[in-house]
Image: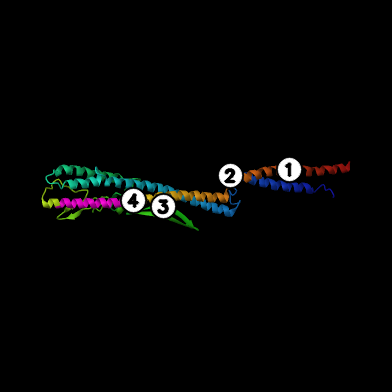
Amino acid sequence: MSSSLLTNSSAMTALQTLRNVSSQLATTQNRISTGQRVSTAADNSAYWSIATSMRSDNAALSAVSDSLGLSAAMVDTEYTALNTIIGDKDSGLTKLQALLVEAKTAGIDRTKIQSEITQIQQDMQLKADSATINGINWLSIDTSTGSTATPTSFNLVSSYSRVGGTPTIGSITVTTATFALYTVNGATKTGILDTVTGNSTTGFASVATLAIGSLDDSAADQAILDGYITQVTAAINTVASAAANLGAIKNRIATNTEFVKNLIDSVDRGIGQLVDADMNAESTRLQALQTQQQLGVQALSIANQNSQSILSLFK
């Protein structure tokens, strides 16, 4: 085989091999440092594009999870207030009903009972007004026109999905009238506890305003008491139904919250399957390439010495 001073084929082959090994080594080192085998579009454009879209979906799901947390706090606040207003034998509507039944007793001092009734009415109003979170109150609502009026319904964001390029936002719709106990600044009271009902026989009053201090043992006043008892009993049933409705919404939010968290984890795993590097394999590959690089340097060094051997031909 002839020797050439200008063309060293062995050195060219060794250099090409060394460049290839160095390129693979750089790729492996990048995977080890980033933990990903697809960290840019240049690594694998299809996988990178899919992973980028999935990360975007996960960001939206994370926002849904945050929204569900706020919705859960809101529903829990209103639910707690409704249960408190229903009360028990010592408070709320339950106590109010018992006092009205007690007021049916002949010869009883109804002015003293009225004092306790007034305290219960004020306490229920206070609790309804206090059931506010993030500036929103479903129990004591503003029905007037204007920018501060309470919306007739709320959409609680509960889910996010994307089919192709079309995103879909799921929500739980809450109608405020279902839970309104009192209306604020409204020309006509429409809340569960401040709506005036009755007739000429049973009297005209709302749960929030009924008064028995001036009633006596006459048949007419006894009929009014019967009407008030019926009215409070109906209010208890309506408020209990509203609380049950909120309880169902509360459970649905809790279920959706857990589902969204699991979905986020699932998408994360999917992204990992697409772009994460197998660190065991990369570690083994790194050691092999480092050895190949060292051998390539030696091979190039040997090939470069071929030119030196040509000198011996002219001695």
Q: Which residues are magenta?
A: 223-246
Query: Which one is in front, 187 or 281?
Result: 281
Identify the residue at horizontal 49%, vertical 52% (top origin): 57
Tell me which amino acid carries mark 1: Leu
- Distance (Cα) linking label 4 and label 3: 15 Å
N-terminal of the two: label 3 or label 1? 3
N-terminal of the two: label 2 or label 1? 2
Tell me which amino acid carries mark 4: Leu
- Please tell me how crowded label 4 is: few (under 14), some (14-19), or many (20+) other residues with Cα within 10 Å: many
Query: Which one is in front, 257 or 173?
Result: 257
Does the residue at mark 2 contact the one at mark 4 (Cβ under 8 Å)? no
- Please tell me how crowded label 1 is: few (under 14), some (14-19), or many (20+) other residues with Cα within 10 Å: some
- Distance (Cα) linking label 3 and label 1: 60 Å
Residue 158: mark: 3
Q: In screen coordinates, is 211 left or right of 66?
A: left
Q: Secondary structure at mark 2?
A: helix
Does the residue at mark 4 contact the one at mark 3 (Cβ under 8 Å)? no
**Residue 4 position within the rendered picture, expressed as x and y whole percent measured from the top left:** 83, 48
Look at discs 2 and 4 and give the one toward the viewer. Answer: 4
Q: Secondary structure at mark 4?
A: helix
Does the residue at mark 2 contact the one at mark 3 (Cβ under 8 Å)? no
